[in-house]
Image (cartoon, rainbow, N blue to C red):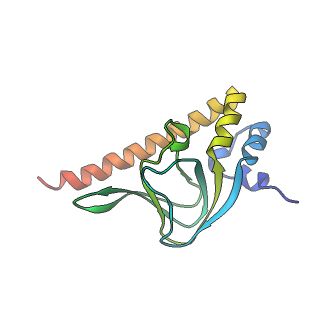
Amino acid sequence: METLEPILAEHPFLQGLSPEHLHLIVGCASNVRFDAGQYLFHDGDKADKFYFIRQGKVAVEIHAAAKGSIVIQTLGEGEVLGWSWLVPPYEWHFDARAIQLTRAFALDGKCLRTKCEEDAHLGYELMKRFTHIMEQRLEATRLQLLDIYGSQS
């Protein structure tokens, strides 16, 4: 039986990770598929997974009462979706919706948190990588807010 390890090893987020750590991560991974329009998660839901997008596009959205859904960022092949699994209370802070048929690897957050607790080097390596993703999402949110509210002068 073939494992996901060779495919995951090629994902940009995991490049340069030690084979031992990659093997630990693979134990938490599964293939998933989302149809266009299908939500991967909603703001306030329990964040128990994150995703490596293999194919397709996903809109990261927030809901504003006066404006409805606002797309903060659109993610595609090779990108990572979700970091709320890493930060208590493990709840999503955005909605994520597949814009087109999307194939991804889902990683079980609880499984991975346990492995990070057992292997501090793995935890530190993942935290460094996720911090970069958090920074990107915050910057995308900042730019979107400037675009929305900066034009109201």
Q: Residue at x 67, y 29 (%)?
A: 117
Residue 42 placement (x, y as % from top left): 45, 56
Residue 29 placement (x, y as % from top left): 70, 51
Residue furthest to the left in view is 153
- Is 89 situated left or right of 115 in this image? left
Q: Residue at x 64, y 37 (%)?
A: 113
Q: Quadrant of the N terminus?
A: bottom right
Q: Residue at x 65, y 50 (%)?
A: 107
- Is 123 situated left or right of 98 in this image? right
Residue 102 placement (x, y as % from top left): 58, 67
Q: Nearer the viewer, residue 124 or 28?
A: 28
Quadrant in the rendering for residue 71: bottom left
Q: Residue at x 20, y 52 (%)?
A: 149
- Is 7 situated left or right of 147 in this image? right
Vertical arrangement, residue 43 with respect to residue 33, above or below: above
Quadrant in the rendering for residue 127: top right
